[in-house]
Amino acid sequence: MDTLDVLAALQQLQDNICTALEAEEDGAAFVADHWQSHLGSGESRVLKQGAVFEQAGVNFSHVKGAAMPAAATAHRPELAGAAFEAMGVSLVIHPRNPYVPTSHANVRCFIAYPKDAEPVWWFGGGFDLTPFYPFDEDIVHWHQTAKNLCDRFSDGLYDEYKDWCDRYFYLKHREETRGVGGLFFDDLNRWDFATCLNFIRETGKAYIEAYRPIVARRKNTPYGERERQFQLYRRGRYVEFNLVFDRGTHFGLQSGGRTESILMSMPPLVRFEYGYRPEEGSDEARLQDYLKPRDWLGKSEKA
């Protein structure tokens, strides 16, 4: 177990993702914000008011603490009170054009240091897609890229992590998924440390391979005020999920992390409207059919 290898892999991934996203822009670039806190340090990179990305944030952090926060020990009560170390890259991309989906990716490594016991390590992460005006070909490409990644490591892994994603990114109070899914995994230690690290490294690469072609296809699609207002309204669901359910947000806030970086995932503009209902049969109403688990690669749909 070498944390230096993890840090090097994560920082390289941050570089690669920022470079790939900047290539889709028209001159806009990420601005790096190096920070330190009582827990550790990191680098938040934010691209604001680009032609393609209204706001994109790619955050690297390396923090340590004397006791694991409740959000990290809810399903690991034996580690309550243990010192911890956490490293990760987390990103949320909010495009300007409503026809380009919002995307999220995260890869992370946790190490707990229980008293009188050996350190306990695990990895987590994944990526998911949140369209406003969905295109089947984009979603199939997204999921096929995810499956190609998983198949290189283990048969059946894609189905397992896709199902986990569908269940995790679910707004219970709305009875809908946040988007069209992807991959989600946590507690990853099924292989040796080096293989698990390679899996999160490859997860980051797969995110770029999955998202960038969608951006390139849709970023010049014409749109008007109607589409823009719907995009802002649907961004409200993103806010709801991240503040109410997201374990990463809860962990960061409970551990006393850097608030500005933790809330980097919030959209720059959002709209809430009481009792909003899209017009029946409209393109906006069509989105609701996509907000439930679906097998995008040719098998029968899940109920």
Image (cartoon, helix red, strand yellow):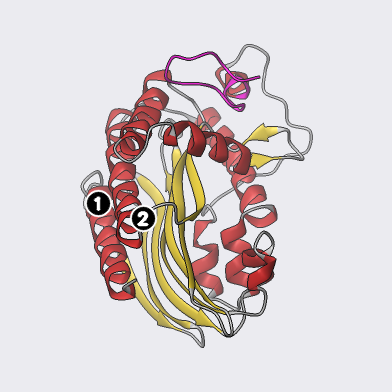
Q: Residues within 10 Å of mark 2 (few under 14, many from 20)?
A: some
Query: Is 68 drawn above or below residue 21 in the view shown?
Result: below
Query: Is 260 drawn above or below residue 90 in the view shown?
Result: below
Q: Residue at x 44, y 52 (%)?
A: 190
Please tell me whether the stretch drawn in magenta is mainly helix, strand or loop. Answer: loop
Counting from the top left corner in percent of width and height, residue 38 is at 51, 88
Nearest to N terminus: mark 1 or mark 2 = 1
Q: Secondary structure at mark 2?
A: helix
Magenta-span inclusion, residue 161: no
Counting from the top left corner in percent of width and height, residue 23 is at 20, 47
Residues at circles 1 and 2 in contact by the CB criterion of under 8 Å: no
Counting from the top left corner in percent of width and height, residue 287 is at 58, 24
Q: Which mark is residue 196?
A: 2
Q: Residue at x 56, y 60 (%)?
A: 248
Please provide the residue range marked out in magenta. 288-303
From the viewer's perspective, is the residue at label 1 or at label 2 nearer?
2
Q: Nearer the viewer, residue 261 or 79?
A: 79
Q: Badge 1 is on which residue?
A: 22
Q: Secondary structure at mark 1?
A: helix
Q: Which mark is residue 294?
A: none
Q: Residues within 10 Å of mark 1 (few under 14, many from 20)?
A: some
Query: Is 71 drawn above or below residue 267 in the view shown?
Result: below
- If the image is split into quadrants, where does the C terminus sit? top right
Q: Amino acid at mark 2?
A: Cys
Q: Residue at x 31, y 64 (%)?
A: 10
Q: Nearer the viewer, residue 59 or 160?
A: 160
Relative side of 97 to 120, left or right: left
